[in-house]
Image (spheres, helix red, strand yellow):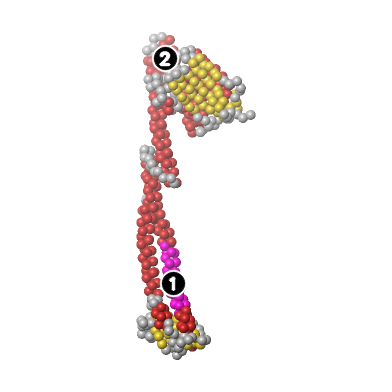
Amino acid sequence: MSRKHCPNSSISWKLTLHFMGIIFLTLFIFGAGISLTARFFSTDQYRKDIKKRVKITAQALGKESENTSKPAGTKLFIETLSNLPGVSVRVIDRSGATIAHSPDDKRQDIGITPQDLQELLNGQDVEMIHPSIHHSDRYYYAASPIISNGKVIGGVMTVISLSLPADIRKRITSAIFKSLLISLLISSIVAHFLSGNITKPIRMMQNTARKIATGDFSGRLKIKRNDEIGVLADAMDNMSEKLENNIKQRLQLTANISHEIRTPLAAIQGCSEAIMDGILDTEEERDRYLKTIRDEAKRISVLLKDLTELSRFETGDIEIEREPFSAGDIIRRAISGVEVFAGKKNIAIKSELPAEEILVSGDSDRILQTLIILLDNAIQHIPDGREIRIILRKSGNSAVFAVADTGDGIPSEDLPHVFERFYKADKSRTRDGSGSGLGLSIAKQIIKTHGGTINVKSSATGSEFWFELPVESC
């Protein structure tokens, strides 16, 4: 049963939400940090800075007043300090009365309290947040004593509206909030694009998998990416290609089996009907027809036996028994097994063996079967009177078995297919009943089971099949 797809449960949607969540959390932490920093500099640090400047100004005025009753630089100091945004500056005497102030001092309603004045006269710095009498605002004032010749002669006082740093903070917070919204919007678009870029090939794989499930193996993803998705896409393409080839091979195998069985069945049917209808005049004809039935039935039996064996090799149901054996002895046994058939075509079989004995590791019966298949294949396909050589040579840690003939060679276009089931290089040649057409396929599977490969090369002067087996170490 197929699961109903919900858009909100798609990987793309989930990835987008995850990306947005991560980005929003990152931006929120960043914005909170900026907001706290802005609060610190717009309020706390601002007040500390003003307090420090007031103290420095008071100290400077005190030094200027040591030789004069009224400091000559008072106006300059006041103007310098009042240049700070939102700051009103005034110089007060011991009674708290203003004796000088900044030009834009609009906060005359904010005065120093008697308690703070007393602390100021005692030489201490004072500060206070004070509500305005005429406004619904709060003000911060800081005062520092002016000390001349060891005596407090007055003080420098600043008045700042707290609405100014609060307004600055609000503006900064508003700018941060707007930046967060814009960043979130942009990041959402980017996140959607990135998630779509990730999930697009996944959707393509999903569609391809659905096609494969319906038996359509022709689709290819062709996704070129150097990441896990690219590896998965290549694996799916390879799987589709192999499945498609397997289906084609299965259909071709079915057609080949039907073709191979049709001829002997037709012969069996025709001969049996002739015998049953009594149309044979002599006992000799009857025996000939019975022999044909026997031979064709044997041909079908060999075909089915080879098909079963080939299938067991391909599915891994056949296990080989590895043991050391003499490569030269196996070659001599293989030649003995086909000498009679070679003699009927006047074909000579010669062996080329090294002087020293070579022991190899493998299943001796299966290797003997492989050599007989290669020799029988050469006998069937070369003209009468030619020659076959079976060669054994050592190459590194391997023993190379080669079967070379002096036939007319295999066409180059047929070489890649000689190990396929029922493949015939000569399309006009029909089988004579001596084989199933699966010999080379079985030989390939035997060598493959041994962990090796079987190869072929051919020219106009003959063909050579060879395979390698590991040499048994002493």
Q: Nearer the viewer, mark 2 or mark 1?
A: 1
Mark 2 crowdedness (10 Å alpha carbons): few <14, some 14-19, many ≥20:
many
The residue that appears at 60% across and 27% down in the rendered structure is: 324
Q: Nearer the viewer, residue 336 or 174?
A: 174
Q: Is residue 337 left or right of residue 269?
A: right
- Looking at the rendered image, the quarter that the C terminus falls into is top right
- Report the predominant secondary structure element of the magenta stretch: helix
Query: What segment carries the magenta color?
Result: 27-54
The residue that appears at 38% across and 63% down in the rendered structure is: 180
Q: Nearer the viewer, residue 460 or 81?
A: 81
Examine the image and state in which quarter residue 86 appears: bottom left
Q: Is residue 35 magenta?
A: yes
Disc 2, SS: helix
Residue occupying the far front of the picture: 67
Q: What kind of residue is marked 2?
A: Tyr
Mark 1 crowdedness (10 Å alpha carbons): few <14, some 14-19, many ≥20:
some
Label placed on residue 41: 1
